[in-house]
Image (cartoon, rainbow, N blue to C red):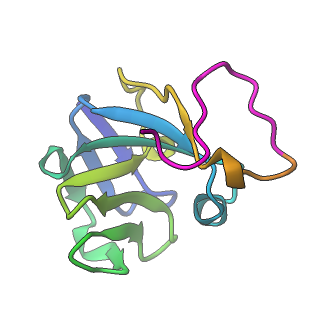
Amino acid sequence: MLSGSCYCGAVQFEVDDAFSYAFYCHCSRCRRRTGAACAAIGGIEIDKVRVTAGSELLLRLGESENGYRCLCKQCCSPLYDVVRGQAFAHVQLGALDGVPAKRPDHHIHVASMAAWHQITDSYPRFDEFPP
């Protein structure tokens, strides 16, 4: 079990340490959302993510049948996105307190990565999504 929280600590959650996949996303949306060159994301079934404190402060943005984003209303920290028809969560690995067993092992959306960033590992790279 891994615990996580937002920057101010008002919203806390736990997630099973059973990520199905993990990756680095270099798309322009993730850069703007995180303020970093890329986002480190772990994918897991939605029922394995539980908000343990501050659920009244969990902000859901862009709700649709496909999913939505979850942030803290107080500090605006991104926590996770509900995706793939609301069946999976894409957890921001930077919001976790511990180290997940499954770590990012590929890069996506490298065709739109920041011109000032350089990938220095040998993980597989995909211009958009993996096949």
**Residue drawn at point x = 46 percent, y = 41 percent:** 93
Residue nearer the viewer, 77 or 87: 87
**Residue drawn at point x = 81 percent, y = 36 percent:** 118
Residue 30 found in image quarter: bottom right
**Residue that extends furthest to the left in the rendered view of this protein:** 47
Quick check: is 124 in the magenta stretch?
Answer: yes
Residue 129 is left or right of residue 46, and the answer is right
* Quadrant holding the N terminus: top left
In the figure, 51 relative to 59: above or below? above
Q: Which residues are magenta?
A: 117-131
**Residue drawn at point x = 26 percent, y = 58 percent:** 84
Residue nearer the viewer, 129 or 92: 129
Quick check: is 32 in the magenta stretch?
Answer: no
* Quadrant holding the C terminus: top left
Residue 3 x, y percent position in the rendering: 31, 39
**Residue that extends furthest to the right in the rendered view of this protein:** 116
**Residue drawn at point x = 27 percent, y = 32 percent:** 20
Residue 89 x, y percent position in the rendering: 28, 52
| Tally of marks | 0
What secondary structure prevails in the magenta region?
Answer: loop
